[in-house]
Image: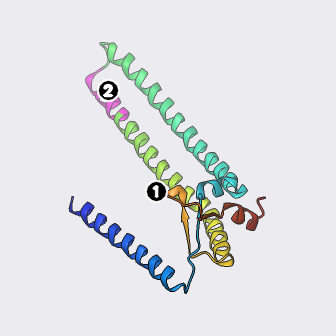
Amino acid sequence: MAEKNIYMKRLIVIFFFASFLLLVNSAFGQTTIKLGHINSQDLFTAMPESDTAQKKLEKIAMQFETTLEELQVEFNKKYEEYLKQSQDPSVGELILRTKEEELQTLQQRIQSFQQEAQNEIAKKRSELFKPVQDKALKAVNDVARENGFTYVFDMAVGTIVFAADNTIDILPLVKKKLGLE
């Protein structure tokens, strides 16, 4: 609760500081503030590099999925064998216990593989999409600098609750900079 209060106080201070800067700016007329906004998700979707990275990631994920299915088939087969043997009165307790331990070990391997696969996919996602994000960010920064923007807000993040009509959507400018349109 205390963290929320601190966050709210900081937000209020930032709001008043920004309002003060705008007021001082308009009173003295020294510098004009030019605001822009962009939806980074729309930009990433428009970039062909994003599709390429997504296809590579899907291929890697399919490889993990295939291996996981193979492990699951192996587990199911061993489980069926265990069930058959557990119904046979001639099978000793030691054999059943050994089969149970084998099933538990295999189940742990499957769970470990799933966790490691998820971590590896997340790592690959970062590796594959970082160049795309870097290229997009550079283009946004270049467009903002070239067109004299003071601030550019990312609408995809969801932190902007209002965008006035005098803010400029720079997505078309960035797409043009990247040769997408």
Q: Nearer the viewer, residue 17 or 107?
A: 17
Position in image of residue 165 (x %, y %)? 59, 60
Q: Residues within 10 Å of mark 1 (few under 14, many from 20)?
A: few
Three-letter code, disc 1? Val
Q: Quadrant of the C terminus?
A: bottom right
- Among the 4 quarters of the image, the one containing residue 109: top left
Three-letter code, disc 2? Ile
Q: Earlier in the sequence, mark 1 or mark 2?
A: 2
- Which numbered circle lies on residue 161? 1
What residue range appears in magenta? 92-103
Q: Residue furthest left?
A: 2
- Among the 4 quarters of the image, the one containing residue 49: bottom right
Q: Quadrant of the N terminus?
A: bottom left
Residue 91 on the magenta span:
no
Q: Residues within 10 Å of mark 2 (few under 14, many from 20)?
A: few
- The residue located at (35%, 29%) in the rendering is 99
